[in-house]
Image (cartoon, helix red, strand yellow):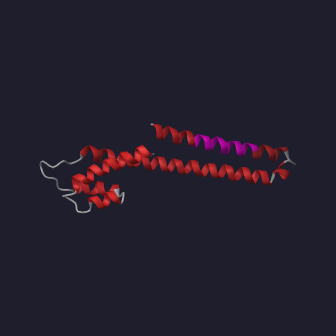
Amino acid sequence: MQTLNKDIEEHASRISVTLEDLHGLARELLRAHEYTKLLQAANQANYGPSHYRAEDERARLPLLLKQKSTLLKQFRVALYLTGSVITFSVLALVVTPYVALSSRLAWIVFVVGLGGFVGCIASYVILLRTALS
């Protein structure tokens, strides 16, 4: 995530430098991390014939922003699943004396807990694969 944030900042900084004399708020947009607005300003700017347009940076920045958004969503899902598994585990411990009276109920609790655990691990595997790709 740090590398991704660094790449986003570098691309946005290059775009901001090209816009400084064309758009009065370019530096402020960069400092405020308003990368989408910075891209919009870069796309709407009237560049001179010999002015550097930062086309590569403008093409790459939306992809980096999308990747960051995807990673954050996947992390959020993994975090919520982890919290759910922990909560379920604590609740299962609380009701253990009642669950122990029925083998069917014990199996249901076991299967639900195992399913939650597998889902949690799968969400982290997906997150890591996305982060490392």
Residue 125: where, in percent of width, then height?
A: 56, 39
Residue 92: where, in percent of width, then height?
A: 76, 51
Residue visible at 82% across and 44% down? 104
Residue visible at 16% across and 53% down? 47
Q: Quadrant of the N terminus?
A: top left
> Residue 24: which quarter of the image?
bottom left
Q: Nearer the viewer, residue 58 or 52?
A: 52
Residue 70: where, in percent of width, then height?
A: 46, 47
Count how many numbered circles sit on residues in the image: 0
Q: Is residue 64 left or right of residue 27?
A: right
Q: Is residue 47 above or below residue 128?
A: below
- The chief SS type of the magenta part is helix
Q: Is residue 133 above or below residue 18?
A: above
Residue 97: where, in percent of width, then height?
A: 85, 51
Q: Is residue 37 left or right of residue 89?
A: left
Q: Is residue 36 above or below residue 126?
A: below
Residue visible at 28% across and 56% down? 40
**Image: magenta residue range:** 110-123
